[in-house]
Image (spheres, helix red, strand yellow):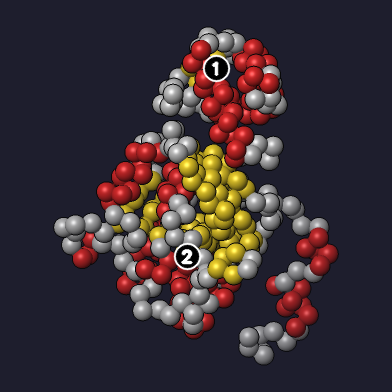
Amino acid sequence: MAETKYQDINDFLKHSAQTSTQLVNSEPVPIPYLLDPLIIKGNYHLLTGPIGNMKSYFSLWLGSQLAESGQNVLFVDKENSLLMTESRARKMNLTDSENFIYWCERAGMSRDQAPPDFKQGLHFYKKVIELWDNPVLIFDTLNRFAPGVDENSVKDTTFITDSLMSLRNHDDGATIIALHQVGKPSERGYQNYRGSSEIGGGSDVGLSIKDFAQNAQGASFRINCWKTRWLPFSDLTIVFDSYSGKFHPLPDFLTTVRYYDLRSSLTKYLKECPEVRGEELKEAMTTKAWGKYKVKETEWMLENREEYWLRAKDGNSFVYKNLPRMKG
C-alpha cells in the first residue's frame, strides 16, 4: 500500500473494511446448500474415511444427486477402474444425466486423455470451471493428484490445499469435494484425516465416515462433520440399501436397525395385501404382530421409499412396486 496514496488511514479503512456494527446489522444470507447439510456451494469439502468404507461409492451418489439438482459435475477418479464404477452405477441405478461426467484412466487410453494431476493439469480444471455453470469437481483420491508430495510435510501439502483453494476461488468459484484417507487409529477412534494438519486446515468443510457396518441387507455409517466454516450439524446416519441400491439419510427418530426391520415388515405386509389403504397399513404397523412401529416411522418410509411403492391417484391407497427378493 503506497504511503502517498492513502494519507488518511482511517478514511481508507472506512471505505475498505467493516465495523462490528455493520457486521451485526448486515442482511442475513441463507447458507447456500447444494445438498443440505452436507454440500455447500462454492466450498471445498474434504471427505475422509477408512479403506473399504464406501467413500467412492457414496461420493458417486453425491455427484449424481448434485447433477440431478442442476449442478454440472466432473468426477475425476484416479483410484477406481471404469468397470468397477460402471458396476456401482448400475447397482445404484443412477439417473441418466448429461450433467454428470465421470473421468478415469482406462486400458488403451492415450496419455493425454488420462485425467491429469494438479502439477500437470490444474489449468485444465480451471478451464472447466470457466466454461461450466454451477461446476462441482470431485477428486478421488486426493494423494493421487499430487504424486511425490509428502503428506506429513506442511510445506508439501500446502501445494495440495493451494491447488484446491484456487479451484474453489477461480472465476465464479467451484464446489470441490476431495476424498482422502483417515489417519491412524487411536483410543478415540481414527484421526479425521491422514497427514499434515494443512490437509484439514485448508478445507472449508470436513466430513468423515464413521461406524461403518455391513450386512446382507446393506450398509450403514455416520457422517461426522468435524470442521465447518458455516453452521455445524449433528452426526448424520446414512443407510445404503442393497435391494434398491440407494443411500438414505435417516431422520433422528429412526435407527438403522428399525429401518431394516420396518422395511421388512412393510414388504411382507404389502406382499400379502398389495391393495391395502394407506391408513390401514400405518395402523397395522403399530400392532405388536408387525413390530409396534410409530406412525411417523411408517409415514417416513412410505413417503421416502418410492422404489418400493407408489402413491395412487386418490392419494390414500398404496400400490406395491418392485418387491425385493426375500429369503424364506
Decide: is 259 above or below 29: above
Dividing the picture into quadrants, the one containing residue 191 is: bottom right
Residue at left offset 76%, top offset 73%: 14
- Which label sits on residue 269? 1
Location of residue 223 in the rendering, given as x and y in whole percent from the top left corner? 58, 52
* Residue 90 pos. (x, y %): 34, 38
The answer, for residue 199, to whether it is visible in the render is yes
> Viewer-nearest of labels 1 and 2?
1
Q: Position of residue 243 (x, y in %)?
A: 43, 33
Which residue appears at 30% of the width and 62% of the height?
115
Left-right relation of 121 to 25: left
Q: Residues within 10 Å of mark 2 (few under 14, many from 20)?
A: many
Relative vertical location of residue 65 with respect to residue 277 in this rendering, above or below: below
Q: Nearer the viewer, residue 26 or 84?
A: 84
Q: Which mark is residue 298?
A: none
Task: In the displayed orientation, state which residue is furthest to the bottom.
Answer: 3
Residue that label 2 marks: 181
- Quarter of the image containing the N terminus? bottom right
Location of residue 144 with respect to 283 vertically, above or below: below
Q: Amino acid at mark 1?
A: Tyr
Give amino acid for label 2: Gln
